[in-house]
Amino acid sequence: MARAFAGEGAHVICLTDGSASHPGSTEWAPERLARQRHAEMVAAIECLGGTACDLTWLGMPDSRLYQTDAATVTAELEQVITDHGARHIFVPAAEDHHEDHQATACFAGQLRSRRPDWKFYSYPVWSRWDDPDFHRNIAGYAPVTVPSTDFKLRKRAAIDAHRTQMGQIVTDDPSGFTLPTEFIEKFITEDEIFWRMP
């Protein structure tokens, strides 16, 4: 994204509101947590060279995309992408084990059949971390790696902007979600990975 913002630009569509990460918190009700997650997303985009105008926040329920009407979501995504004139669409890989990532990949699959003029790419998040056979499982997709060396400091700053996921803000839910330190370092130090959606 930093590379794109430095060139022709980019636009981020965030489907969910992030409000389900700390269900045991009494200080951070879902609505408050969603507002914080939105602010963190804007801050991360700014670290990468974009602005708040480069974000479309759909605010759907976190971890429940599978309950949404796929046709409605797909139509909304198509409209946003069309409005921004995008031709290259990047979505979480279907191989990821997070239900929202899998749902988003399904939406993209439906869009691809309607918009053959767009190019769709997958990027792995959780599967890159927790699949011991990750490289073997994706080899058939002919993945492309993109060095992020020139943007490593921006990348780290963008990740650090997500303070609710670092255990830095929500302190009254010890069972809440926190990104593992090793996970963060893996994504900062390793190349980006993409492949054309199969």
Image: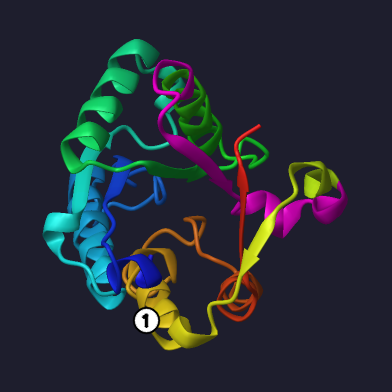
User: Which residue is farthest left?
Assistant: 53
Q: Is residue 148 magenta?
A: no
Answer whether residue 186 is visible to the viewer in this image: yes
Q: Residue at x 52, y 32 (%)?
A: 105
Question: 152 and 60: which one is in front?
Answer: 152
The one nearer the camera, 89 or 166, is 89
Task: Point out residue 72 in the picture as x, y percentages from the top left corner.
Answer: 28, 14
- Choose top left, top right, bottom left or bottom right for residue 67: top left
Q: Is residue 36 left or right of residue 20?
A: left
Instruction: Tell me the quarter of the image containing the N terminus.
Output: bottom left
x and y percentages locating residue 43 in the rendered image: 23, 70
Residue 127 falls inside the magenta stretch: yes
Q: Residue beneath label 1, please?
A: 157
Q: Nearer the viewer, residue 172 or 197?
A: 197
Residue 8 falls in image quadrant: bottom left
Q: Is residue 138 above or below residue 113?
A: below
Residue 171 in sight in this render: no
Mark 1 residue type: Ala
Q: Is residue 26 left or right of residue 88?
A: left
Chain part drawn in magenta:
112-136
* Residue at the image position 74 percent from the left and 54 percent from the top: 130
- Identified at 44% across, 71% down, the residue is 166
Crowdedness near tag 1: few (<14), some (14–19) or many (≥20) residues, C-alpha within 10 Å: some
Residue 170: % across, % down: 34, 65
